[in-house]
Image (cartoon, rainbow, N blue to C red):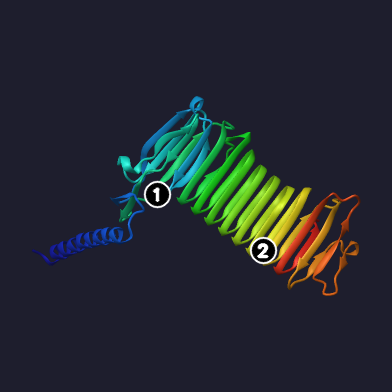
Amino acid sequence: MSRKGAAILIAGAAMLAGIGGIGLMSVDYVKKNGTGGRTTSFVFGGRAELRNVIEIPLSDVESLSMDYRSKNIRVYPSGEDAVVIKEYLYSDRDEAKASLTFSGEKEALITGGGERPFVLFGFFPGEGERIEVYIPDKSLKGLCVQTGSGNISSQMNAIREQGSLLVSAGSGNVTWSGVQGKEIRIQTGSGNVRVEDLRGNITLHAGSGNITGENLEGTVNAEAGSGNVKLEKFRGGGKAQTKSGNVTVKLESLEEDLALRTGSGNARLELTQGQAFHFQAQTGSGGINTDFEKELSFNKKGNQARGDVGSDPRWTVDVRTGSGNVRVCYRQ
């Protein structure tokens, strides 16, 4: 045998040994750490393909809940009178596919498969496993979308005007836009929340990540554990707060009480001129700077201020920081 042929055989043997070693290590990892009650499959190459389609006629569903342990989920508008779930998965095994049950009258529950894939040598390009959901516009009374680890996104309004929306990611980013409903809650444990064109009672939460909102209307409660909160083109009121980060709110119209809170960071509020409100601000170690200081009274330390701005104020603006500056100004 030539030297070149021997080298090829040696390289091939080394590759097979490596694959076997990785496989054994993966099996050993599963044995030691478990799979959280899920079965395990080992996938060579890693191509996610359309493996499962669930179709629910709109006449059979009013509320939809989706619960996946680790998948990216995207929601799209549907041109059919049905809710359609398409699963792009590595495995074609039944254990990898979601199941459909009904917990009540027209209350559908999609539960993600109990199989956990381990990909060996991801040869194929692509984004990996994902779930595509197609829902007719404004068709559902309630929609709940949850994933343990993965990103969630949508640019359509799946719920009715008096409907409810819950979107939750354990670790991943959530991007959602174009919803009008009675109750809207969007949250992530570790990741960013980005929302746009929402109207209703809106709750936004990020454990460790930033919250960004644009063109929101209604009562907003935005809370970040460690990250920044930024709301632009906002109409309404509520609370924007973070433990460690900055809070920035650009207000188009004040329609109820508004509170800004930061633990360690700066708070900035931009207003349109002509709005009337009761104002109070407090900072532990920082300065207070406004475009209407002549209408305010300060304490001796200068870290507390209060007063009425404009005529016949109805709502209260309350800004407080632990260690950071307060800046309230009129938008130019």
Q: Work out whether residue 246 or residue 205 is closer to the camera in this orientation and state it.
A: 205
Q: Residue at x 83, y 65 (%)?
A: 305
Residue at the extreme left of the image, as rendered? 1
- Quadrant containing the N terminus is bottom left
Question: Secondary structure beneath disc 2?
Answer: loop
Disc 1 secondary structure class: loop
Q: Is residue 227 above or below residue 99?
A: below
The residue tagged 1 is 128
Q: Earlier in the sequence, mark 1 or mark 2?
A: 1
Q: Residue at x 81, y 68 (%)?
A: 304
Instruction: Decide: few, some or many residues near mark 2? Use Cα within 10 Å; few <14, some 14-19, many ≥20.
Output: many
> Taking 232 as reference, is 111 above or below it?
above
Mark 1: which amino acid?
Gly
From the viewer's perspective, tell me whether residue 14 is left or right of residue 274: left
Q: Which mark is residue 316?
A: none
How crowded pointer 1 is (Cα within 10 Å; few <14, some 14-19, many 20+) is rated as: some
Residue for badge 2 = 246
